[in-house]
Image (spheres, rainbow, N blue to C red):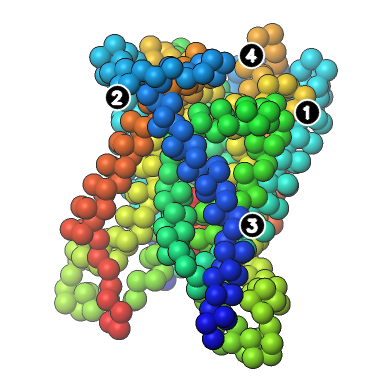
């Protein structure tokens, strides 16, 4: 019996070996070495030289672009994630009426989020919001003759990126649609009998029942929004312009590491980001006890 | 909820118009790729070219400095297919190990897996580059393929969820018949997790096809570029004015993704709904 148990330990490790190895080599070791590099001056060609906390100090005292890129990134994350989720829920509720066309609409709304992260779409977006792009051309049909380049103007550039993110609401919408289908019909019927109106039903039934899904989406999308890179890189041609208005944190980190070869400094930036994302995730989870409703089994 | 006929029509007009609005940019991209170069921006709002112009596909396909899009597409397919095979097979093995065997440290590795799933990739970008530079992997496909042979947390999680729905009695019965854990995996589990494996393959295909930052960092020779990175070259230097070619190749690069979507729609929708996986 004991022998058999021991065998199972071995079997377990045989199956999980790929992950265990990969975790140690491609995740844990890089994380730890990144922590070490963050305290050094490292340009890839000479051995890292110990700097102590200098990189961190420089980030917060000398480098104005850090504050700028954080401001840009926070604006991007806090505008795009909630708006995208609200939009996704809104459309999901509209599509949650049983018609035969629901499948077609669902595909049409999902397609943007399927291809949205690609370079092709980023290029397309750049052309839509350019000075001669689709948007200005469409506006001229309504008699509005605009020659501004929406991606070239500092006040609107970031919002084109936010619009691109919201445009990709489809995958959240599908998750919400599945969630809505799981809410028992009789909850709504019972509420209707009690004379509850639709606003009341939305806030007292729909939202609480969807809250675990919202929590999951909010967390993952916040993390991935912080790492947005491709559209900002393509639309600003790798510069983060105009006037650093699209210099998302990831883009700045990339420039520090791979244009300036300041690997130590970039590692310090990565750790600050990890810290921010960690704290945010923790805050979301801490707050979730107040607003996330878990149904107890056997209801 | 059944709607009355008039309000049903109103509903379809409204939702249909909105769907068209959301699709418009994509349709515009495809339509522009068929317009003559001088027409793309003069009648930007229009979806209908004055005449169909396939020459954009020809000039775009020519690529840059002697490397055609034939090479870029081949590179993309090599990277995507190999990394997808690696990711799906390794993730299935790990998922089975975590879901169906009991071993020392199991809980710990599960937590590590979930933590890796949430880890911002930026944190390991720099040290991974340093590591792969030491391995002499920079400039080859290796950094884009090999790490995927060690399990992808999202897929491990998805397959685990799927394995948990398979009754344990099946394992027990196979065990009584003399099957080891290995043959249970091979004979009982693998045939039953087909749908989950398909879902993972599709997502892996999308993610690897669209991947931009990794090729950008690890590849330096245009002959090795996948399509995603090659498209960027249209924005550089003297190729800057070949709008038609750029639109044509951008459209072409989306084609495999859209085709896979229409073939495997069912798996994608189920995959997203059950795990919250982002598409």
Mark 3 against mark 1, which lies toward the viewer? 3
Q: Earlier in the sequence, mark 3 or mark 1?
A: 1
Q: CA distance from mark 4 to mark 2?
A: 29 Å
Q: CA distance from mark 2 to mark 3?
A: 40 Å
Chain letter, disc 4 residue? B
Q: Position of residue B6 (x, y in %)?
A: 42, 61
Q: Position of residue B120 (x, y in %)?
A: 43, 40
Crowdedness of circle 3 by 10 Å Cα count: few (<14), some, many (20+)? many
Q: Residue at x 43, y 44 (%)?
A: B119
Q: Earlier in the sequence, mark 4 or mark 1?
A: 1
SS at circle 2: helix
Q: Say which residue label 4 marks.
A: B236
* On screen, residue A117 above or below A196: above
Label drawn at residue B151: none
Q: Residue at x 43, y 17 (%)?
A: A49
Q: CA distance from mark 4 to mark 1?
A: 16 Å
Q: Residue at x 30, y 21 (%)?
A: A53
Q: Earlier in the sequence, mark 4 or mark 3?
A: 3
Q: Say which residue label 2 marks.
A: A71
* On screen, residue B93 above or below A262: below
Q: Say which residue label 1 marks.
A: B69
Q: Given contact means CB atoms under 8 Å apart, are the residues at marks 4 and 1 in contact? A: no
Q: Say which residue label 3 marks.
A: B90
């Amino acid at each position: 019996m004991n022998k058999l148990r021991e065998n199972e330990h071995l079997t377990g490790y045989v199956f999980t070996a790929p992950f265990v190895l990969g975790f140690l080599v491609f995740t844990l070791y890089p994380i730890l070495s990144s922590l070490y590099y963050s305290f050094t001056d490292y340009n890839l060609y000479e051995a890292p030289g110990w700097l102590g906390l200098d990189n961190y100090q420089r980030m917060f005292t000398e480098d104005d672009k850090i504050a700028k890129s954080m401001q840009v990134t926070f604006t991007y994350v806090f505008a795009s994630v909630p708006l995208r989720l609200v939009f996704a829920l809104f459309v999901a509720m509209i599509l949650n009426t049983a018609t035969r066309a629901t499948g077609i609409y669902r595909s049409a709304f999902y397609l943007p989020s399927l291809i949205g992260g690609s370079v092709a779409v980023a290029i397309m977006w750049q052309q839509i919001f350019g000075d001669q792009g689709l948007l200005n051309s469409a506006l001229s049909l309504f008699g509005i003759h605009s020659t501004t380049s929406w991606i070239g103007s500092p006040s609107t550039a970031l919002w084109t990126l936010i619009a691109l993110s919201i445009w990709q609401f489809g995958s959240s919408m599908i998750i919400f649609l599945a969630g809505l289908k799981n809410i028992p019909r009789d909850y709504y019927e019972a509420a209707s009998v009690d004379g509850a109106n639709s606003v009341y039903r939305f806030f007292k039934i729909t939202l609480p029942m969807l809250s675990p899904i919202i929590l999951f989406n909010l967390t993952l999308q916040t993390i991935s929004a912080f790492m947005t890179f491709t559209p900002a890189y393509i639309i600003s041609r790798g510069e983060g312009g105009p006037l650093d208005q699209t210099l998302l944190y990831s883009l700045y980190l990339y420039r520090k590491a791979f244009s300036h070869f300041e690997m130590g400094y970039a590692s310090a930036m990565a750790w600050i980001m990890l810290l921010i994302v960690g704290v945010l995730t923790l805050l979301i989870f801490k707050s979730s006890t107040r607003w996330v409703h878990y149904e107890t089994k056997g209801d | 909820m059944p709607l009355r006929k008039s309000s049903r029509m109103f509903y379809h007009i409204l939702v249909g118009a909105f769907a068209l609005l959301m699709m418009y940019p994509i349709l515009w991209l495809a339509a522009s790729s068929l317009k003559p170069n001088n027409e793309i921006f003069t009648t930007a709002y229009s979806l209908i070219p004055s005449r169909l112009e396939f020459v954009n596909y020809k000039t775009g396909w020519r690529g840059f400095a002697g490397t055609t899009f034939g090479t870029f597409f081949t590179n993309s397919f090599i990277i995507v297919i190999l990394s997808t095979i690696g990711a799906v097979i390794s993730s299935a093995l790990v998922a089975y190990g975590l879901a169906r065997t009991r071993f020392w440290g199991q809980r710990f590795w599960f937590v590590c897996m979930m933590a890796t799933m949430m880890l911002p990739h930026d944190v390991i970008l720099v040290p991974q580059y340093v590591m792969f530079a030491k391995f002499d992997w920079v400039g080859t496909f290796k950094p884009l393929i090999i790490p995927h042979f060690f399990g992808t947390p999202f897929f491990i999680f998805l397959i685990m969820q799927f394995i948990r729905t398979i009754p344990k009695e099946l394992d027990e019965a196979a065990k009584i018949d003399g099957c080891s854990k290995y043959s249970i995996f091979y004979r009982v589990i693998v045939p039953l997790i087909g749908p989950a494996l398909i879902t993972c393959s599709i997502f892996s295909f999308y993610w690897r096809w669209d991947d931009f930052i990794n090729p950008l960092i690890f590849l330096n020779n245009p002959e090795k570029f996948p399509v995603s990175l090659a498209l960027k070259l249209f924005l550089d230097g003297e190729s800057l004015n070949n709008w038609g070619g750029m639109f044509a190749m951008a459209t072409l690069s989306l084609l495999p993704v859209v085709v896979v979507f229409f073939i495997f729609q069912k798996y994608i929708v189920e995959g997203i709904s059950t795990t919250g996986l982002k598409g």
